[in-house]
């Protein structure tokens, strides 16, 4: 189904999907379903989801309350994810990896918009 660029809900849905897919670039060993809903014992999957949430909040400027509603996560989980990634961004190696994932998420969203506009 093509994306309706005038529907905020559809745009947000594609943005979130782009964030998850962009983060998978840095976590190729994880299936997408583990990034979306990390198994309890998979700490790398939890970090991947935290990064996706952070990208959704910062790159796409999505309000936290909207992220909570879309992901069905607790407000504290979303806040903790953003804080955790903010702290990790102080490490240059992590920051470079994060930037690649964030750029990839933005490219995926843009590609989807262009594909559906054609």
Image (cartoon, helix red, strand yellow):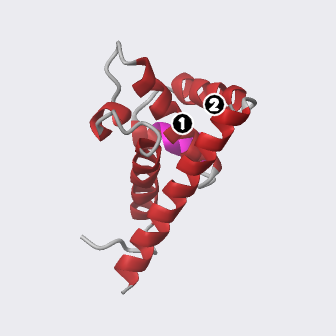
Relative placement, left or right, of 112 versus 51 is left
Query: x, y percentage for residue 45?
Result: 40, 27
Secondary structure beneath label 1: helix
Query: x, y percentage for residue 105?
Result: 50, 55
> Residue at the spot x=28%, y=36% of the render?
33
The quarter of the rendered structure image containing the C terminus is bottom left
Furthest toward the bottom, the residue is: 118
Residue 55 appears in which quarter of the rendering?
top right
Q: Which mark is residue 78?
A: none
Relative placement, left or right, of 97 versus 68 is right
Q: Nearer the viewer, residue 61 or 43?
A: 43
Asked if the stretch drawn in magenta spans residue 65, the answer is yes
**Residue denoted by label 2:** 85
> Residue at the spot x=40%, y=34% of the render?
72
Instruction: Rate crowding at label 2 as few (under 14), some (14 to 19) or many (20 or more) other CA atoms within 10 Å.
Output: many
**Residue denoted by label 1:** 51
> Residue at the spot x=63%, y=48% of the render?
99
Q: Which residues are magenta?
A: 63-68
Q: Nearer the viewer, residue 85 or 68?
A: 85
């Amino acid at each position: 189904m093509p994306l309706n660029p005038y529907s905020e809900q559809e745009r947000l849905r594609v943005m979130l999907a782009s964030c998850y897919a962009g983060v998978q670039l840095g976590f190729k060993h994880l299936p997408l379903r583990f990034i979306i809903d990390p198994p309890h014992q998979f700490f790398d999957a939890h970090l991947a989801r935290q990064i996706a949430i952070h990208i959704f909040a910062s790159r796409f400027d999505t309000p936290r309350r909207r992220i909570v509603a879309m992901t069905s996560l607790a407000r504290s989980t979303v806040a903790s994810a953003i804080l955790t990634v903010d702290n990790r961004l102080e490490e240059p190696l992590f920051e470079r990896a994060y930037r690649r994932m964030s750029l990839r998420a933005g490219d995926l969203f843009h590609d989807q918009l262009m594909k559906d506009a054609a």
